[in-house]
Image (spheres, rainbow, N blue to C red):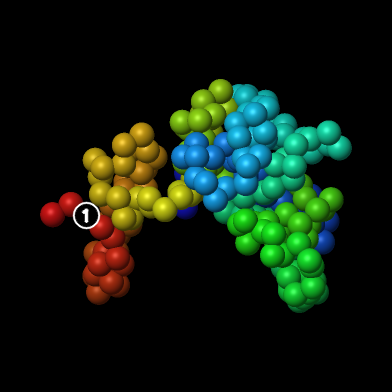
Amino acid sequence: MIIMRNMDELMEMDLPRDWIAAAHACTCNPRKLPHYPKDWIPANCPHTSVQHPGGLTSPPRITESSPRTYTLLNSGTVVLHPSKELAESVIHYLSTSPLVPTFSFPDQDLLAAHFAGRWKVLPWCYNALKTLREIHKPLWRDDEVRCLHYILHDKPWSTPRGTAGIYELQNGWWWDTYDKLGQEMQASNPEGWAIVDAQVTKLP
């Protein structure tokens, strides 16, 4: 993930102490991965129901008639009030709920189930999944992205420049950020930068 715009407003949002705030999961399954739930199709994706500019202020609403997928969050960006009591309640749910074995995506399915009815939906821009730019064009705007989330296995740090296909632009933003960090660290902490740089895949 990289921060594209300041998002400090999340630190001051009105959120009850036992609630969570997060953006919806994208349930389009564009790669048609067979292990994804069968109801993960574009028609059921919460992001399909909104477009720019409304999606910046009015994220998809969860109603009694909403598809099941509308109750699913993506855990890339979450806002909550950390406390011992909240942590213990999550651990207790994880240890006792009969739903746990049914979770397809353990971390975010756990949070969605535990905070059911206590979830404030964030606009897409605070957890801008890299795939949204390609499959939800009516919603996405480059200049509105606050936090860019590199979902799926082909991360930019393991995908050299020029090899990312349709995600070349999004990955390029990561590489630009990485190059800037490199310039700063090489000047202030060259040994630390050598450790970081060794973890990144580059073309020969």
Left or right: residue 66 versus residue 190 is: right
Label 1, on which residue? 202
Res. 166 in view: yes
Q: Position of residue 58 (x, y in %)?
A: 72, 32
Q: How many marks?
A: 1
The structure residue drawn at horizontal position 66% and vertical position 39%, both measured from the top left corner, is 39
What x and y, as percent, mark residue 157? 33, 55
Kindly state the secondary structure of the residue where label 1 is placed: loop
Q: Amino acid at mark 1?
A: Lys
Give the class, few, some or many, for how many residues have Cα within 10 Å of label 1's Cα (few <14, many ≥20).
few
Which corner quadrant of the image does residue 61 belong to?
Answer: top right
Q: Nearer the viewer, residue 4 or 170?
A: 170
| The one of 117 and 194 positioned closer to us in this rendering | 117
Relative horizontal placement of residue 41, taking residue 3 as reference (left or right): right
Instruction: Please identify the residue farthest to the left as the structure is shown.
Output: 204
Give the answer, above or below, for where 148 lies relative to 17: above
Q: 167 or 5, which lies in front?
A: 167
Please name the residue shown 57% across and 48% down the image: 36
Q: Position of residue 54 (x, y in %)?
A: 67, 26
Q: Nearer the viewer, residue 199 or 13?
A: 199
Q: Position of residue 161 (x, y in %)?
A: 25, 45
70 to the left or right of 2: right
Classify the position of the C terminus by image quarter: bottom left
Residue at screen point 61% across, 24% down: 52
Residue 124 seen by the camera:
no
Q: Quadrant of residue 69?
A: top right
